[in-house]
Image: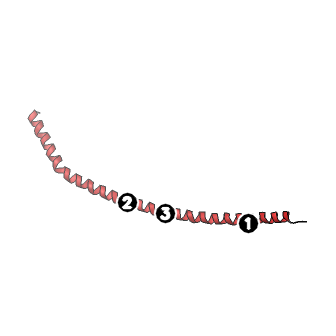
Amino acid sequence: MTKEERLLKLEGIVEAVVRLLPERITSLEGRLEAFRQELTGEIQALRGESKEEIAALRQEMKGEIAVLQQEMQGEIVACARRLRLRSTPS
C-alpha cells in the first residue's frame, strides 16, 4: 500500500468518524441524562427512607427516655421515703 493509498484510507476513516461522532455524542448525552434522572430518583427515595427511619428512631428514643424518666422518678421517690424513714425519730 502506497503512502497515498494509506492517506486516502485514513481520510476515509476520519470522515466516517466525523460523521458518526455528533450522533454518538447526542446518544451519550441522552443516556447520561437518563442515568442522572434515575440517580436523582434513587437519591430522593433514599432520603425519604432515611427521614422515615430517623423519625421512627426518634420516637423510639422518646419512648425509652420516658420509661427511664419514670424509673428515675420511682427511684427518687423510693430514696426520699427511705430518707424520711431514717430521719423520723423512733
Q: What amino acid is found at the position of numbered circle 1 in the picture?
A: Gly
| Front of the two marks 1 and 2 | 1
Kindly indicate the quadrant of the structure image that contains residue 42: bottom left
Callout in the foreground (2, 3): 3
Badge number at residue 3: none
Q: Amino acid at mark 2?
A: Thr
What residue appears at the point 16 percent right and 47 percent down from the top-left corner?
Answer: 16
Observer able to see residue 81? yes
Q: CA separation, marks 1 and 2?
A: 51 Å
Instruction: Give coordinates of residue 13: x percent, y percent.
Output: 16, 43
Q: Disc 1 on helix, strand or loop?
A: helix
Q: Position of residue 12 (x, y in %)?
A: 13, 43
Dot 3 or dot 1: first in sequence order is 3
Above or below, 4 against 60 in this view is above
Which of the two labelled residues, at mark 1 and mark 2, occupies the earlier sequence position? Answer: 2
Name the side, left or right, on which 3 lies relative to 90: left
Residue type for callout 3: Lys
Screen quadrant of the N terminus: top left
* Mark 2 lies on residue: 40
- Give above or below for 33 relative to 88: above
Number of callouts? 3
Helix, strand or loop at label 3? It is helix
Left or right relative to 32: residue 50: right
Q: Nearer the viewer, mark 3 or mark 1?
A: 1
Most extreme residue toward the right is 90
Residue holding disc 1: 74
Which residue bears the numbered disc 3? 51
Could you tell me which residue is drawn at 18 percent across and 50 percent down?
20
Kindly tell me whether residue 2 is visible in this rendering.
no
